[in-house]
Image (cartoon, helix red, strand yellow):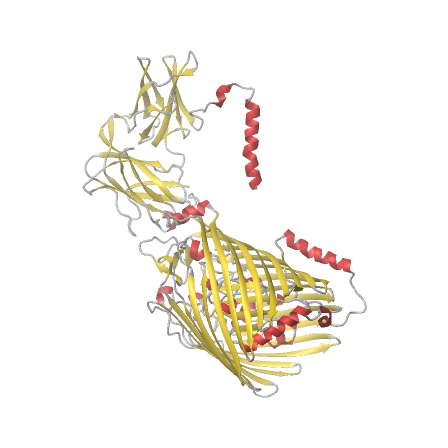
Amino acid sequence: MIPIKDLKGFLCPFLRVSFQQKLYLTLFFSALYLSSYGQEKKPNICAASCAMKCVEVCMDSTKIQRLSEVIVVAPKKKLTYQRQSKPLSSVDEYLEKAQQITMIKRGAYAWEPNVNNMATERLSVTIDGMRIFAACTDKMDPITSYVDVSNLSKVTVSSGQEGSEQGNCVGGAIDLELDKTGFKEDYLRVSIEDGFESNNEQKIVGADINFSDEKFYVDADIIYRDAENYSAGGGEEVLYSQFTKYNLSFNGGLLLNENSKLSATFIFDEARDVGYPALPMDVSLARGIIGSVAYEQVSLGPLTNWATKLYANSITHIMDDSQRPDVPIRMDMPGWSDTYGFYSQASLKKEKHQFLFKADGFYNRSLAEMTMYPNDPSQSPMFMLTWPDVRTLNTGIYVEDNIAFGKAKLKLATRLSYQNNFVADDFGLNSLQIFYPEMEASQNRFLSSVSLLYSKKVKSFDVSVGASYATRAPSVSEGFGFYLFNSSDNHDYIGNPELNNEQAIEFNGAVSYKSKKLKIGVSGNVFRMPNYIIGEVEQGLSTMTIGADGVKIYRNLNDATISNLYLNTEYKINKHLKWNGGISYHRGIDSDDRNLPFISPVAYGGALSYHKSTFTAGLEMQGATKQVNFNPIFGENQTDAYTVFGISMGKTFLISKNTFYVKAGVQNIFDTFYSTYADWNNIPRIGRNIHFTLSYKIG
Amino acid sequence: MKTIKHIFPILCLVLTLASCSTEDDDLFEENPVADLLLVKSMTANDHTIEIYSADNQFTIGYNELAVRIKDNTTDTYFDNPTIDWTPVMHMTSMMHSCPKSTITNSEFPNVAKGFIIFQMPGNDTEYWDLKFNYEINGVSYEAMDIIDVLPPADGMKRVSSFMATDGSRYVLAMVSPSNPDVMVNDFTAALYKMENMMTFTPVENYTITVDPRMPGMGNHSSPNNEDLTYNSATQMYDGKLSLTMTGYWKVNLMLYNESGDVLKGETVTDTNPESSLYFDFEF
Ligand SMILES: [Cu+2]
Ligand SMILES: [Cu+2]
């Protein structure tokens, strides 16, 4: 065990803040948590444990690079952050850079991340390991929309069962890691950020304060964004694409002794007046309140890195159509999702084995309603529960063993969980019993996953092969949704409480070559998915939504297969100039050879980046080929090929001891009009957009 | 909240017990008409005939009624009287009756129950009266008074009186659900054939198809409804009515006789939004 103190650096000669004051501050944050579900954030891992963790993570990431992609966002607002072509871009734009992620867009805000061409239901998406569930029945608020770049240090994207550490998943996982200053001696930094984007007149203002000493730290940040409608390539305005949002976050930590620390996090995120040009409704309010407290201890008997976290979060989502001039009927659709959870994990090293044990659980409540106002004002409003107050209790254990054999490593992992779903609202239960007369309010499921991954270094090559099996329970919409309208295939969807668990049998492999100048990696995976869950047309049912083409009910298909192949390269042309490029192929079919929806065509991208002392510049290219495999049954039509280009430049100035940083760039230089396969109802993407970022750091 | 839920009834119980303990024990006896409203009382023969309904009025459509007869001299109710009732509407040009059940003793000896289906409301010049012929201890009595039969407060249609393609006149009334909900509701209707002005008989073994629609929402329907079929035990028609949301619903109906001929009603299609035979309600 490495003593914490050594890694923390030398002791500061005097303490600027008394222990008492720190205690008060910590109590203050705890109170915030208690008063409004604040979640306390898992404190930074103390320097010691962090260092240990890092060593492993880094080893992992070189060996199995393709499996865990790490997107660096803004760790302590350091240089990496400035190298981004658009430092104040949304979290979504950062995520989109990862090769394994594709983003389904319904507007300019709150895109839905897919990993391996699988969406939210098949992924585990967490913030610092916390489970959070969106409150929108129409997927307008992926949980990635409740954080911002101002409070993230990095995002870890895991493929397949590499993601099961955080929760049940079949396709992969995304964990958004909050940025924490950690314990540093006598550290105070204030930074102010300002951004502007020409296309949609987006104004971005952010500020953050980080204060820490050896035993205490506190971070606070705020970011505000306000955007008007954007224009597509060619100048056509995309109506209802405006948004306004702000995000506040605090986190703090207290070193209790050399072995342990306490920390807390709290995020308040609110978006208002968010337009969704691809959908028939907009959002007047999307609010997330997210809090956690965590206790960490370097060792516990033979165990190390013991970390325990309690968290709670509350999401409110209010859809409205009051801005739309002609709708067949006015409606309100609010939704709520509250989650309470915990996890506790520890590592154990024994000879060649490195174990990780984790126990976790959450309790979620999802409720959504729909009220329609008849055009005849004498008629009373029509009401239904679209999510019938579904309570989900999930508890599980996760065990992982990394076994080292010289230059090779074998990773074995398993997750076993028990899940109970309970429909708490009788009105909702009665509604679903119209379709399922035998349905009971409560149902139990047992979920399991196992995976193995063997990786080996052979000279300059890293090779890995893996296999896994996993199951997942239906999501709230899939299991219990009631007349949820999907505007892409123009059908109403009814949940099915009688669904079987979906399974996934996955095989993956990767080879990467690395020399001083060149890195090449090829990786691929195949998911064979018995009982794949998807909505199928049910003949003879009357649509609820005016103008819908029919009603679909979620069914288990016999089988579906999704495969992905990725190639990526990095070449250092010289000390200052670097090339990155990648291309990927994806395919998804079901057992009747039908194309699955939202599977990417061949996609490619490349970037040349230049970096010399305080100056950075970049040229980027991104594109996709014409979509060949698409399926009108799922509302898809063929998407054309496109290629777009971007350029950016940045410079850092030192003014006395402070840093002033300027960056400017152009996206979609040629103002190309295009949309991708992942743009809901083919809404076009943003046209030429000039962006500026100014950042000023004191201290 | 939960605790309050539990505490509240206990508190009520305690209060009730406390307040009652000084009063007369009779109040502990179940009041047979406790949940009902007195809609009419007639005085005749030194008796008062009290008529109760769940509604606060006689409404056109199906009325479930409770009747008890009080001896005004002793202020007590007679047990097990034999009662017969006849509602008659006096119209400007004619008189007619309406479908009704017999009136029989209930689980309480001094309360008799039955139903009347009024097919139209009274007005300034046309009115309903209700005549009772009853027998107590071997003595026959008669009482009669005018009653007010009103349209439902919500203006909705829960009864239909119509001439069918077979040349007969029928009365079809919705019996339940009286308080529809978002669920598969048990659906019951009563069908009577008008034999003559004063005689209505229950119709057996016809079929009534059920197609609920929401005209306010593109006239959508709902799944898993069941047609109304004859139940010989109740002499009424039972089926299922699925309602997928609250609001205004029009239940379109079609009446078929035993050999499958349509006697009344039309299929709802894109061009024909409603049947001429329907019930409607809002909740
Ligand atoms: Cu929404
Ligand atoms: Cu409706």
Q: Residue at x 64, y 55 (%)?
A: A33
Which residue is at the front of the view, B273 or A473?
A473
Residue A365 horizontal/vertical position (percent): 52, 52
In the displayed structure, would residue A669 be above or below residue A131?
below
Residue A314 on image: x %, y %: 57, 55
Figure check: B30 above or below A381: above
**Residue that sits furthest to the front in the current view:** A351
Q: Residue at x 78, y 62 (%)?
A: A17
A194 vs A375, nearest the viewer: A194
> How far from the left and from the top, in percent, is residue A360?
56, 59
Q: Is residue A277 visible?
A: no
The mark tally for this picture is 0
Q: Is residue B281 left or right of residue A518?
A: left
Question: Which residue extends farthest bottom?
Answer: A574
Residue farthest to the right, as pictured: A14
Is A496 left or right of B96, judged from the image as shown?
right
Q: Position of residue A6 (x, y in %)?
A: 73, 72
**Residue B265 vs residue B32, the one in the foreground:** B32
Q: Is residue B142 visible?
A: yes
Which quarter of the rendering shows the N terminus of chain A?
bottom right
Q: Quadrant of the C terminus of chain A?
A: bottom right
Quarter where residue B117 is shown: top left
